[in-house]
Image (spheres, grey):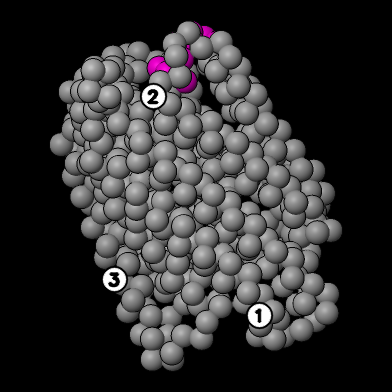
Amino acid sequence: MTHKSQSVAYPYFVVSLLLFGLQVLMGLWLATNYFTTIPQSIVDAFPFSTARAFHTNLLVLWLLLGFMGATYYLVPEETNSELYSPKLALVQLGLLAVTGVVALVGFVFGWTQGRPLLEIPRPLDFLVVIGALMFLFNVGMTIIKAKRWTMTQGSLLAGLFFLAILYLFGIPFYRNLSVDWYYWWWVVHLWVEGAWELIAAAMTAYMLMKLTGVERKVVEKWLYVELGLFLFTGIAGTGHHYYWLGAPKYWLAVGGIFSALEPFPILLMVYDTWRDIKHRKEPMRPKLTWVYLVGGVILHFVGAGLFGFAHTLPQINYYTHGSQVTVSHGHLAFYGAYVLLNLTFYYFAIPRIKGFPGFEYDEKTGHTGFWLTALGVLGMSLAFAVAGVLQTYLERVQGQPYMLAAQPIRFWMFIAFVHGLVVVAGVFLTIKHLLTLKPAPSPASA
């Protein structure tokens, strides 16, 4: 850590990790609902829809806080100046964390907009907007005052600005449901495959420069190419969400073609990472940080690229839309693309914030946490995929009612639950490891 204000990132990491733990517990509870009959008294007090709102909104909140913390660590180093206002960053964290807690309590009492992923009530939306403006002001002023501009921070700032603007389209409720869902996808899809990709590319490029010692101009040249491809395919690829909501027919062709191209920039990222490793000047240490970085790139390609491509064409999506096939794609894609990215950054930044010698740490428990979580998510996603194919056949080909078709898939949802237990164990081990991270033992004591 070269600037004192970078330490403001640490509270963001801590809060986001605690929310991550709560999110996976909610996921386990949701899986239970699919293979066993929950007593009605519990369903009345804590319905499935409320638990799902907890699970999905916690995911968005902790990932966003992770991105923001990473930005507060990254920007001072990129601009070679202290953060404009560390106090404002802490106030912003408090505001967003309290807003999140109030939203969760509100869900329990039915205070919700009712739209999946955007359940947060409108008055709280305005607090989120205030928090986003505080964040953009703080980061923007740091860059303006430093008068030092890099491609990496440009990509990061563009992603964060894009993210804030898109959120505004999800605040109003449109009386025409087709229009409402149209803009709902602007937030949900364009966040994930537009704004977040810009942020992810910047964070990955920054860590590769620091970990490999590769020259900035080499990494940033590839950053331009990847960003261009991500935006080209990601924005037009939104069309695969417009197939069945009443949008014009041309979206079938636009969505089908550009969605099919979406795996290519991810594949390029895989190649880019392999090329950086091949030409690295420094040894791959700490090994666990590299395991997370490479694991994230591979699972990003499998989850977002391959699993996404498998049901993105309209001829297939007509049958699989909204089934457990989508759940399978969503879980592996989010885990590979963004969960592992945030955790990689935590393992990169925390040893630097704590001033560990050589930025190396005791890795042993972390490896166990990584493999438990990764294999658990992979097994869970495969179980969802099998359940989804079965569900699609029974419901959409044979025309069976939902509740009747739900019976045969119970076994596969139980398999998903068992893998979920492994995920929870891995996540809690990882959280404990990160929050109690210790310097690597000296060679003499090892």
Q: Is residue 257 left or right of residue 8?
A: right
- Mark nearer the N terminus (1 vs 3): 3
Residue at the spot 68% in from the left edge and 49% down from the top edge: 308
Residue at the spot 33% in from the left edge and 76% down from the top edge: 108
Is residue 162 visible in this depiction of the protein?
no
Location of residue 39 with respect to 108 vertically, above or below: below
Task: Label 2: state its secondary structure.
Answer: loop
- Whole-angstrom CA distance, mark 1 to mark 2, is 46 Å
* Mark 3, residue position: 105
Q: Quadrant of residue 415?
A: bottom right
216 or 306: nearer the viewer: 306
255 or 404: nearer the viewer: 404
Q: Which quarter of the rendering shows the N terminus?
A: top left
Amino acid type for the residue under numbered disc 1? Ala
* Mark 2, residue position: 286
* Mark 1, residue position: 406
Residue stretch rendered in magenta on the structure:
208-218
